[in-house]
Amino acid sequence: LPPLLRDFRAGHPDIAVQLLEDKTVRLLPKILSGALDLAFVRPPDRADKRLEFRDLLQETAVVALPQRHALAKRRSITLADIAGEAMLVPDRRSRPHSHDLTVKLFERSGLTPRIVQVADEKQTIINLVATKLGVAIVPRWTARMAVSGVRFVPLRSKESGPAGRLPLAAAWLRGSRDPARDAMLAVLAARLRSYAREA
């Protein structure tokens, strides 16, 4: 989002952008009510037909470990490496994609995660990792959070494809006219490949 906003502002300095950060389950109703023009969300399994979605990219998952953890110095780790670790996961009701990412990755590997704590926000989960309460599978962008005592290590998966990745999509009201939103989507389409490299 920061590079997109920078690029959008460079080309459209006359359009004011107001940000609202929230979970997908709270953002989509705001689009339907007209309170939001555009949202970047995890696409729901069953989408409301009044909404239009454009798949953008698949975010890479990494493992957040306490800095002094025995696995923290590795270049990459597998699920088998963390199978016995205490896992911190997002609440499924508010973050189903992130929660299911951990659970399904373990299930596909024939393993069961040892979940010790559920938390609502990524920032909270990362801070819990810093206090050595456990480890977490999180999107790679989370590594940009300035939390000392945490190391982010790439997750190596035996599977190819979307395993170990989180989908991101743009969503807006189907059939609505919005020149500012369309300008933002045009910038996004033109620069998506470069943004995706960082995901």
Image (cartoon, rainbow, N blue to C red):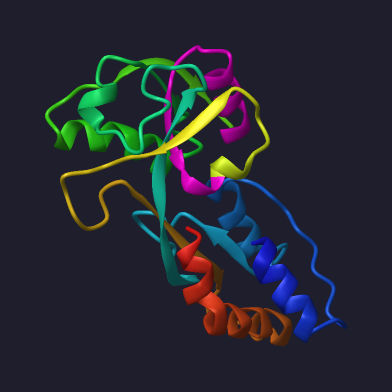
Tell me where residue 198 appears, x and y as whole percent.
50, 60
Q: Is residue 108 one of those drawn in magenta?
A: no
Tell me where residue 7 appears, x and y as whole percent.
70, 76
Relative to 158, say whether 197 is above or below.
Answer: below
Tell me, yes or no, if residue 180 can be seen here: yes
For image coordinates 61% across by 44% down, the residue present is 144
Q: Nearer the viewer, residue 175 or 69?
A: 69
Residue 15 sits in quarter: bottom right
Tell me, yes or no, if residue 37 can be seen here: no
Q: Nearer the viewer, residue 175 or 110?
A: 110
For image coordinates 52% across by 22% down, the residue present is 67
Would residue 147 be found to the left or right of residue 111 on screen?
right
Tell me where residue 106 appears, x and y as whole percent.
22, 31
Relative to 106, say whether 19 is above or below.
Answer: below
Q: Quadrant of the N terminus?
A: bottom right
Q: Which residues are magenta?
A: 122-141
Residue furthest right as drawn = 14
Q: Is residue 136 one of those drawn in magenta?
A: yes
Q: How many marks?
A: 0
For image coordinates 26% across by 42% down, the residue present is 156
Tell me where residue 126 appears, x and y as whole percent.
56, 28
Residue furthest left as drawn = 110
Would residue 190 be found to the left or right of residue 64 on screen?
right
Relative to 175, say whether 146 is above or below.
Answer: above
Residue 172 sits in quarter: bottom right
For image coordinates 46% across by 54% down, the residue present is 42
Residue 27 sits in quarter: bottom right
Q: Nearer the viewer, residue 44 or 83?
A: 83
